[in-house]
């Protein structure tokens, strides 16, 4: 069972997945910073300043009187649609960045493939002695065994 486990872990796709998860977690911090530190302030400036999606909610209980989401959640049930809008914007930015990354990688791959195709000369025909030996080999294969 230990050998099977080692084989499972050593497979390329498992290692690729592990690397992807680790890089994804680190990438999440970058996207959060882009959203919170770059995009949201611009949206706030365009909408009149001080605009913060995270504190937009609808109280679902008459006990909720707080103006901040954290305090309102302590008082009772709230419908936190502002937090959803923030997460949605975060997702759209992440999807756009991944789209641009995949598009860039595909462009580089296509460029490399074109360079390979353009830089590879046609294969030279085999030398005359190699060609003769190949013919002799093929003739010997067709003869019945003695």
Image (cartoon, grey):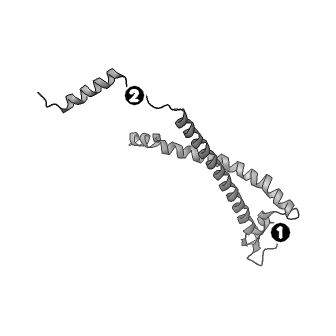
- Residue that sits furthest to the bottom in the current view: 62
- Tell me the residue at 70%/57% (across/down): 90
- The answer to whether any part of residue 22 appears in the image is no
> In this figure, which residue is indicated by the disc labeled 1?
67
On the image, the x and y values in percent for residue 96 come to 67, 55
Does 9 sit above or below residue 61?
A: above
- Residue that sits furthest to the top in the current view: 129
**Of 39 and 141, the residue lying toward us:** 141
Does 7 sit above or below residue 89?
A: above
On the image, the x and y values in percent for residue 123 come to 44, 30
Q: Mark 1 falls on what kind of element?
A: loop
Q: Report the side of 142 relative to 126 (left or right).
A: left
**Of 130 and 52, the residue lying toward us:** 130
Q: Report the side of 49 relative to 146 (left or right).
A: right
> In this figure, which residue is indicated by the disc labeled 2?
125
Total marks in image: 2
**Of 42 and 37, the residue lying toward us:** 42
- First of labels 1, 2 by sequence position: 1
Q: Which mark is residue 80?
A: none
Q: Quadrant of residue 76?
A: bottom right
Quarter holding the C terminus is: top left
- Tell me the residue at 48%/41% (across/down): 12
User: Are the two marked residues, 1 and 2, in contact with CB atoms closer than 8 angstroms?
Assistant: no
- The answer to whether any part of residue 36 appears in the image is yes
On the image, the x and y values in percent for residue 39 come to 78, 56
Q: Mark 2 falls on what kind of element?
A: loop
Does 12 sit above or below residue 119?
A: below
Number of residues whose C-alpha sits closer than 10 Å to that of mark 2, classed few (under 14), some (14–19) or many (20 or more): few
**Of 54 and 100, the residue lying toward us:** 100
Quarter holding the N terminus is: top left
Number of residues whose C-alpha sits closer than 10 Å to that of mark 1, classed few (under 14), some (14–19) or many (20 or more): few
């Amino acid at each position: 069972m230990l050998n099977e486990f080692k084989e499972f872990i050593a497979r390329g796709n498992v290692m690729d997945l592990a690397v992807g998860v680790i890089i994804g977690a680190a990438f999440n911090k970058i996207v959060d910073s882009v959203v919170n530190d770059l995009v949201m302030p611009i949206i706030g400036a365009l909408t009149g300043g001080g605009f913060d999606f995270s504190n937009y909610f609808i109280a679902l209980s008459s006990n909720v009187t707080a103006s901040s989401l954290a305090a309102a959640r302590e008082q009772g049930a709230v419908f936190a649609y502002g937090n959803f809008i923030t997460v949605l914007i975060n997702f759209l930015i992440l999807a756009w960045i991944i789209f641009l990354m995949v598009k860039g990688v595909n462009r580089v791959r296509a460029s490399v493939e074109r360079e390979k195709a353009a830089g590879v000369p046609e294969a030279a025909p085999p030398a005359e002695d190699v060609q003769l030996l190949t013919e002799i080999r093929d003739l010997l294969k067709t003869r019945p065994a003695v």
